[in-house]
Structure formats: structure tokens, C-alpha cells
Image (tube, rainbow, N blue to C red):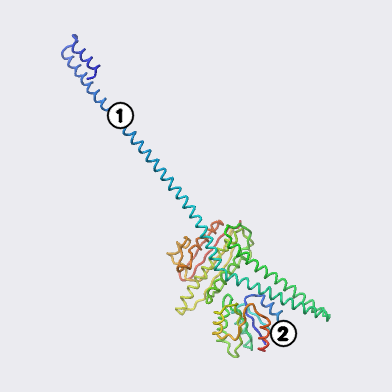
Amino acid sequence: MNQNLQTILDFIQQSKHLSEDEKATLTKAAKDADKALTISEFKLVRTEKVKRTTAILLEETIEELEHKRKAIEDSNNALQKSLKELKATQSQLIQSEKMASLGELTAGIAHEIQNPLNFVNNFSEVSKELLEEMQEELEEGNLEDVKEIANDVIQNLEKILHHGQRADGIVKGMLMHSRSNSGEKESVDINNLVDEYLRLAYHGLRSKDKSFNAKLETNYDDSIKTVNVVPQDIGRVVLNLITNAFYAVNEKNLLQETQGDKYEPTVSVATNTMKNNIEISVKDNGNGIPQKALDKIFQPFFTTKPTGQGTGLGLSLSYDIVKAHNGELKVETKEGQGTKFIIKIPII
Amino acid sequence: MKILVVDDEQDVKTLFLQRFRKEIRKGELEFMFAFSGEEALEVLKSIDQEAVLILSDINMPGMSGLQLLEIIKKDFVAPPPVVMMVTAYGDEENYNTAKELGADDFLTKPVDFKLLKNKLTQNI
């Protein structure tokens, strides 16, 4: 029993002023107090124990959290690293996609350069003949003929310059197309750009597949002056869409031929001004895109072409390029009737 | 003799007119030009099947030179025109197809005008 309570109890027992009843009541109260005190002491000890256990647990938890934090940090670093690698791979992919499409273009470019070169050579040669003729006419004093020949030679020199510049433009375009760093925006004649890439795509495909042919329809909006774009990037988008359109009409043509149906493969390219935007549309009368493929066409690596024929990056990169120009790339398609892609770019 | 030149390049016209200026002036040759296969057929219809020599490019948008050749050989028979095809250098495939379709002669790009002049004067 508690020392103080024992003293109180002893005092009660020896007191002469208290009745036996009073003594019994007080003694009971003292014993009850002692019981309560014992319980409290026990509880206190137990609480202490719990506290100690909790402290240990807390310490362990903190340690575990620290482990976990480190683990997260590690995986975060690993993720950062693979993200960096992914980005590097992506830019490599973009570059190889560029080079692949350049490869497809080579034949078209050769054809496109050969033609102006032929003109340069031919007009030079014929001009030399004309000047020799002019000398003869001068000797004979036929001034009217001399004037006429001089005009022809002037006209020919203009043509030589024109075709020389045409070849120059094609070579520049090719170099820009293969450049790996992203180009700068510049003021570009959109109609010219679209037409140039249309011709490249057409001759490129023709050189690979002699049996291929399609009707080309162009409808350029002459009111479009120049638009600020990265020319080789927008060129790539146009090239991509036109190549796809050719592929679509060719597929349908092969199918129709086996069925003996009459079909005229047609690809139409048009430009338009819409409020503050210009639109470039590429339309084909191929088989259209099935609904289940439509949701995926802009996803990287999605392709319906046989293995080895498409990278599945064309439309996805096109989409990114148009987005980077604050524009939109939209598609309208009807199964069995054809597809139309529309590039919308704001005029800045 | 009438010669119909079919090529999608417009400057071919200027070039031919200058290359053959003497022959044209003397009235030995008469040139007509069409800038597509479709246009060539229209010209042929309009001149009522006069004796003609056709000089056609193969690589053209729309109706190709080969398709044009096929139609000419099938539909224009009295009198049959002479068809000379211009093929790209080293293009065996088109050469063989054109031969099968009945092309009468061939020229390789870039066109050698001296050779062409010889061929044309032989045909007169």
C-alpha cells in the first residue's frame, strides 16, 4: 500500500474521536483510493511501454520511407535517362524518315533536274546557231532578219535563266529537305511549294513504278501571297499527303483492274484562303480509310502498308509539324470513295 | 509533212520552232503542239487523219504517252500515223512496252536534234 495512505489509515485506526462506523467508512475510502492509485500506476507503466514501442515503430517507418525515397529517386533518374534516350531515338527516327523520303524523291529529283538542264543545253546550242546565222545576215545587210534573230536570242537567254533557276530551286529544296536541324520560318510562296513537291512526288513514284499513272488536278488560290512557314517541313507534310494519295489510288486501281471495272485514279491538290488561315488540301478518289483505322492514323508507327513499305511515321510527323505551325491537320474520308486531308495554317 | 509534238513542258514548243526554223521557213516541216495526251487526241481528230508524224513524251500527267500510243494505234488507222516515242535514258521498261504497243521509232532524252532532223528528213 501507498505510504501516505498507510499513514492516513493508521491515523484513522488510532483516533478516539471517531465512531466505529465512521472508521469503517474512512478505511474503505482509503483502501479504494489505494486500489485506484495502483490501477493508475499500472496504466502509466503500460502507456510508457506503448510510447516506447511507438517510438521504435516510428523510427523504423522513417527509415523505410527514406529507403523508398531513394528507390523513387533512382527510378526517377532511370526514367530521365530513358526519356533522354527516347528523345535521341526520336530525332534519329525523324532524320531517317527524312532521308527515306529523300530516297524516294531521288528519282523524281533527277527527272526534275534533267528537264531544265535539257532546256538549258538546248537553248544554249540553238542560240549559238542563231548568232552564227545572225552574223551571216549582218554580212548580207539584212537588218530586219538580224533584229528578229536578236529577239529570239534574248528570249532564249531568258529561258536559259528560267530553267537554270528552276534546277537551282530543286537542288536547294533537296538540301533543305535533308537538313537535320529544324529550319527557320520564312516567307514562302505556298502555291509554288505545293506544286514543286507535287511534281517531285509524281515523278518519284513514276520512276519506281512505271505502270503507275494518275490524273493530277490542281487548283491554286492565286490570292495567297506568302505565308510564314518552315518550307522544308511544310514541304514534307505536302509530300507525305500526296505520296499517300498516290498510294491510295494505286491500290484501288490494282483492285479495279482485277475486277475489270473502269476507274480513273485522280489526285487533286488545292489551296484556299479562309479568314486568317490558308488551307492546303490533298484529295484522292481511292478506297478511303476504314473507320477502325481512322482513330489511329496519326499515331506513330501505325501503318496499313505491308511490312517494310511504310514507317508509320509519315502522318504522325506531319501532324506534329502542322501543330508546331499552330495549325490543324484534318481528315475527311468516305469508304470506297476517297480521302481528303486538309492542312490549315494561320497567316501570321 | 505535219509533225505533232506531245510534251507537257510548254517550252518544248519554242525549242522546236527554233531548232527547225530553216525547215519550217522552207515549208518542209509543219509543227503542231499538244501539251497532254488528251489534247493530242483532239488535235488528231481535228486534222482529219492527214499523214502525220507524232513525237510523244511518255512521262506526262494524265494520259501517259504509252496510253496515247495505244489509242492511236487502235483508233487512227487510215492512214496510220508514224509514232516516235521519247524515252528517258536507260528506261528499258518503257522502251519495251512502247515497242510492244507498236511504236515506230524511238528517241532518247535528252533529244539529239541532229539525229531527229535526219530521221524526219528520211520520213519526208
Front residue (pair A76, B74): A76
Q: Nearer the viewer, residue A171 or B49?
A: A171
Circle 2 chain: B
Which residue is label 1 attached to? A48
Asked if labels 2 and 1 share a chain, the reply is no
Question: In the rendered view of the protein, which quadrant contains the N terminus of chain B?
Answer: bottom right
Name the subunit of mark 1. A
Tell me the CA gap for discs 2 and 1: 123 Å
Q: Which residue is mark 2?
A: B23
x, y percentage for residue A9? 21, 15
Q: Amino acid at mark 1?
A: Glu
Q: Residues within 10 Å of mark 1 (few under 14, many from 20)?
A: few
Residue at 47% x, 76% y: name it: A254
Q: Nearer the viewer, residue B29 or A71?
A: A71
Instruction: Give amino acid for label 2.
Output: Glu
- Residue B85: horizontal and vertical position, in percent? 60, 82
- Mark 2 or 1, which is nearer the eye? 1
The residue most toward the bottom is B78
